[in-house]
Image (cartoon, rainbow, N blue to C red):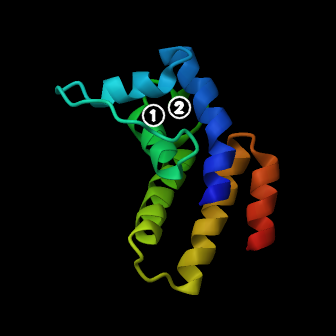
Amino acid sequence: MVLLGEGLAPFVARECEVEFGEDWTTGVQRADTRGGGRTRKVNPLDPQFLLKVMWDEWNAIFRKKLGRTERNYVSELQDARNKWAHNEAFTVDSALRAMDTAKLLLESVGAGPHASQVDTLH
C-alpha cells in the first residue's frame, strides 16, 4: 500500500492541479463537502485518499487519461485497501491479486519504478 501511495501521488497531484490549482488537496475536499461538511487535513501520499480522489473525480479529471479498466483497478484497490486497513483476513491469492492490480495501475499512470518494486514483492 505504501508503494501504491508513493507511485500514485505524483500523477494524482499533477492531474488535480490542472483542475483545482496548486492547493488541489483543499479543492478536492471542497468538491467532496459541497453539502456543508468541513475540510480535514489529508496526507497526499495516503493510498486511501488518492484512490478516493481518483474515484470521486473520475469523470471530471481522470477519464481523460485512463480507461474503464483502470477505473476497475481503482475500485478493486479501494476494496483491498479497506480490508487491509481494517485487519480483515487476506488469502494469499487475494494478496497476490491486489499486488497485480496495483502493479497494473501504477504502470498505467507512469509509475514504472514503483510498479517494478511491487512486482519484486510479488
How far is disc 2 from disc 1 in space, using C-alphas?
Answer: 5 Å
Q: Nearer the viewer, residue 43 or 20?
A: 43
Name which quarter of the figure residue 100 lies in. bottom right
**Helix, strand or loop status at disc 1:** loop
Say which mark, if any, is on residue 4.
Answer: none
Residues packed near mark 1 inside 10 Å, few (<14), some (14 to 19) or many (20 plus): some
Horizontal relation, residue 105 to residue 72: left or right: right
Task: Determine the residue positioned at 75% across, 44% down.
Answer: 111
115 to the left or right of 72: right
Q: Pick the residue in front: 94 or 67.
A: 94
Q: Amino acid at mark 1?
A: Trp
Residue farthest front in this picture: 41
Residue 62, numbered label: 2
Q: Could you say which is closer to the camera, residue 42 or residue 12?
A: 42
Measuring 49% from the left and 81% from the top, which residue is drawn there?
90
* In the displayed structure image, the side of residue 28 where residue 106 appears, left or right: right
Does 62 appear above or below 24? below
Q: Which residue is mark 1?
A: 58
Point 67% across, 34% down: residue = 10
